[in-house]
Image (spheres, rainbow, N blue to C red):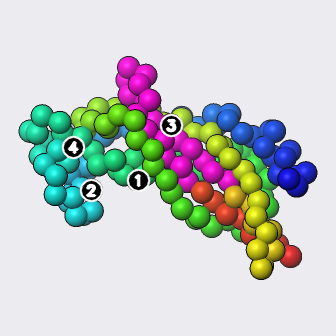
């Protein structure tokens, strides 16, 4: 592993750098489900006994910061994808808390040179402290030549 990547991993991995609360309004989750083409009543009907936000809804929530302060700039950053991991349903009408940390930093070398990837993970918790879901956002930085 490149020395600068190893140093960034040592300094920044797994340290919370942002915390934000989110209100989960039923009308927003229903509209999100409808726009995604969802047909299951548990996502569209607030009277359904198992009413919940669609699992991918949390990917639409973002913290106040994408990367920690003083994170090195390896080059121009671009979106490199999202990932969602669900453990428990997110219930509309509740407030959840998201805590963000860098989950991974790695590099790949391609035809255009080295690319550095940073994976920011927001872990979402309900008011009782139950871990509901994770949402990962990847940023790729192509190193300047």
Query: CB of mark 1 within 8 Å of CB of mark 4?
Result: no
SS class of the residue under badge 4? helix
Answer above or below: position of 60 versus 143.
above
Magenta span covers which residues? 118-137
The numbered mark, 2 or 1, whose residue comes first in the sequence reads 2
The numbered mark, 2 or 4, whose residue comes first in the sequence reads 4
Residue at image point 76% right, 49% down: 71
User: How far is disc 2 from disc 4 in space, using C-alphas?
Assistant: 10 Å
- Between residue 79 and residue 86, name the one nearer to us: 86
Q: What is the number of the mark on residue 5?
A: none
Q: Position of residue 137 (x, y in %)?
A: 55, 54
- Quadrant containing the C terminus is bottom right
Query: CB of mark 2 within 8 Å of CB of mark 1?
Result: yes
As drawn, the residue found furthest toward the right would be 3
Answer above or below: position of 11 versus 106.
above
SS class of the residue under badge 3? strand
User: How far is disc 1 from disc 4 in space, using C-alphas?
Assistant: 14 Å
Read off the residue under disc 1: 60
Read off the residue under disc 4: 26
Question: Is residue 120 on the magenta stretch?
Answer: yes
Q: Is residue 52 left or right of residue 67?
A: left
Residue 64 shows up from this direction: no
User: How far is disc 2 from disc 3 in space, using C-alphas?
Assistant: 21 Å
Task: Please rate how many residues cluster around mark 3, counting C-alpha atoms within 10 Å: few if below 14, some from 14 to 19, many from 20.
Answer: many
Total marks drawn? 4
The numbered mark, 1 or 4, whose residue comes first in the sequence reads 4
Read off the residue under disc 2: 32
Read off the residue under disc 3: 123
User: How far is disc 4 from disc 3 in space, using C-alphas?
Assistant: 21 Å
């Amino acid at each position: 592993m490149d020395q600068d990547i190893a140093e960034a991993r040592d300094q920044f991995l797994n340290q919370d750098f942002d915390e934000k609360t989110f209100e989960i309004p039923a009308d927003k989750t229903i509209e999100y489900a409808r726009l995604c083409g969802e047909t299951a009543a548990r996502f569209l009907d607030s009277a359904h006994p198992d009413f919940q936000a669609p699992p991918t809804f949390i990917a639409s929530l973002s913290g106040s910061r994408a990367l920690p302060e003083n994170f090195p700039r390896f080059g121009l950053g671009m979106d490199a994808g999202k990932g969602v991991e669900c453990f428990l349903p997110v219930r509309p009408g509740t407030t959840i808390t998201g805590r963000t940390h860098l989950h991974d930093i790695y590099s790949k070398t391609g035809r255009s040179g080295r690319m550095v990837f940073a994976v920011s993970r927001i872990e979402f918790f309900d008011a009782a402290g139950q871990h509901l879901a994770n949402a990962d956002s990847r940023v790729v930085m192509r190193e300047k030549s």
